[in-house]
Image (cartoon, rainbow, N blue to C red):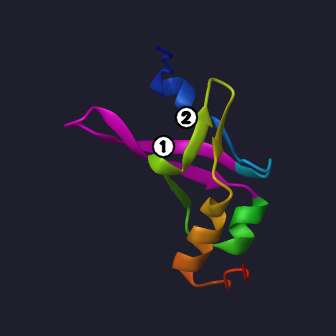
Amino acid sequence: MSILMGKKIIGLLVESESGEVFGRIRDFELDLDSQSILKYYVKGDNLIKKLTSAELVIHRSQVIFIDSKKMIVKDTVIAEEVKRGGEAPMPAM
């Protein structure tokens, strides 16, 4: 079992599976009943600030990988955040 302490989670680099850097974790939400992390709150870099004024909130289901150096999330994370904010159209698939 791998363990990562809370003070190591805060400030952890967050990037997409394609390698785009989103920013760093500034906080996380803990479910007290299950004692598990539900969401991560990411302080964005310039790219995120251009796309949305809201902070990036990443649900644990969107996390692909996490270790002591970085968290990798699905490429769709930023597209979902932009769609909710209504500031940019979703790209055609």
Q: Main secondary structure of the magenta part?
A: strand
Left or right of 78? Residue 34 is left
Residue wearing tag 1: 27
Inspect the magenta stretch and tell me whether residue 31 lies in it. yes
Residue 18 is situated, as x and y percent measured from the top left of the image, at: 79, 51
Instruction: Work out whether residue 93 or residue 44 is closer to the camera in this orientation and state it.
Output: 93
Report the Cα–Cα distance between label 2 and label 1: 6 Å
Residue at position x 73%, y 55% in the image? 45
As drawn, the residue found furthest toward the left would be 33
As drawn, the residue found furthest toward the front would be 93
Instruction: Work out whether residue 62 or residue 21 is closer to the camera in this orientation and state it.
Output: 62
Residue 9 is situated, as x and y percent measured from the top left of the image, at: 54, 31
Point out the tag, 2 or 1, that comes first from the N-terminus: 2
Tell me where the magenta segment starts and ends, as one range: 23-45
Inspect the magenta stretch and tell me whether residue 64 lies in it. no
Q: Is residue 62 above or below residue 33?
A: below
Residue wearing tag 2: 10
As drawn, the residue found furthest toward the top would be 1
> Which image quadrant is residue 56 in?
bottom right
Residue at position x 58%, y 51% in the image? 42
Mark 1 residue element: strand
Q: Amino acid at mark 2?
A: Ile
Instruction: Work out whether residue 7 or residue 56 is closer to the camera in this orientation and state it.
Output: 56
Label 2, residues with CA under 10 Å away: few <14, some 14-19, many ≥20: some
Q: Amino acid at mark 1?
A: Asp
Marks 2,1: beta carbons within 8 A:
yes
